[in-house]
Image (tube, rainbow, N blue to C red):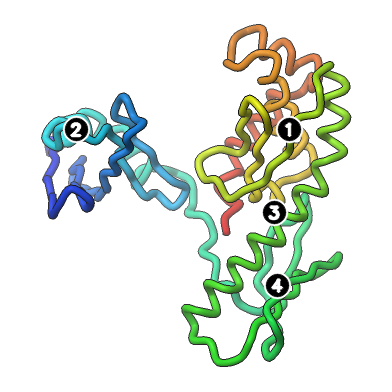
Amino acid sequence: MESGVSQKITDNSQESGEVEYEGSVIPYKIRRNPRSKRVIIKVTSDRTVTIVAPPKFQASKIHTFAMEWAAWIHKKTLGSPRPLPPARKYCIGEVYPWFGGEIRLMILKGRETSVSVNDKEIVAFIPDGLNNSEEDFLVRNLLLFCFRNALYKYSLPYFRGYSEKIGIPLPILKVNDKKGSWGTCTPKSIILNLRLCMAPPDIIAYVIAHELCHKIEPNHSPRFWKTLEKVLPDYKDRMTFLKENGYLWTL
């Protein structure tokens, strides 16, 4: 069967479509970004397909672009050999990867909202009277808060050590819930994805070293990789591990 695209446009804010490839239909959404200069296809770990395009880029051209990339979209979604990442339920006893080990979620009701962590558990305190949706939303946000703080504290020694080794001033460290990248280097700071809490320590170290080396070389030129290799001679193994396993670290 030939590949094809069906177009579904309800209004400018809710554009979507479907790619048909080898008998399979794969839906996607279109997101307009005023900063985009070209069309980009993004596939998340749960196989959601989003096409990011400039605001004035014609919808018909976006769908034509999707059709041209139908085989690639299928490969990254229905044709992917990877299992789907775990679907989080935010319930008592749920287990999360934690700095190379595991940690269990405990939920206690009837108290003011707060969260604490020890060697074995993340303990989320929530009030009574919430429905399931409200409870899930609150527990997830407590987890995000806990992960953010834990990663910030854990990463500081790496930042100090690698900054000194590379020979650069210690940058500002930020941790957020940014999707799509594990780390980002900005002119004034390094931003880490809080999901790195789920990674083993050597992978956290790799992401930190990688971003700090961008302070020397902002792109991925040969000079950049040589700088990183001096800091982490086995960076290729760590990078491969991150690519192969990072999709499992979900919240």
Amino acid type at mark 2:
Lys
Q: With respect to residue 127, does 38 lie above or below? A: above
In this rendering, which labeled residue sits more in front, label 1 or label 2?
2
Tell me residue 168's x, y (percent): 80, 19
Q: Are marks 1 and 2 in contact (CB under 8 Å)?
A: no
The Cα–Cα distance between marks 1 and 4, rounded to whole angstroms, is 27 Å
Q: Are marks 3 and 1 in contact (CB under 8 Å)?
A: no
Q: Earlier in the sequence, mark 4 or mark 3?
A: 4
Residue where numbered disc 3 is placed: 148
**Mark-to-mark CA distance, 3 and 2:** 37 Å
Q: Nearer the viewer, mark 2 or mark 4?
A: 2
Q: Mark 3 Cα within 10 Å, few/some/many (few <14, many 20+)?
A: many
Q: Is residue 30 left or right of residue 146?
A: left
Most extreme residue toward the top is 223
What kind of residue is marked 3? Answer: Arg
Between disc 3 and disc 2, the foreground one is 2
Whether the residues at callouts 3 and 2 have beta carbons within 8 Å, the answer is no
Q: Secondary structure at mark 3?
A: helix
What is the distance, in whole Å, between disc 4 and disc 3 at their CAs?
16 Å
For label 2, the SS is loop
| Nearest to the observer: residue 95 or residue 125 | 125
Q: Amino acid at mark 1?
A: Ile
Q: Is residue 147 toward the left or the right of residue 166 in the image?
A: left
> Closer to the camera: disc 3 or disc 1?
3
Circle 4 is placed at which residue position? 105
Q: Which residue is mark 1?
A: 208
Looking at the image, tell me whether mark 1 or mark 2 is earlier in sequence order: 2
> Front-most of 3 and 105?
105
**Structural distance between the alpha carbons of marks 1 and 2:** 37 Å
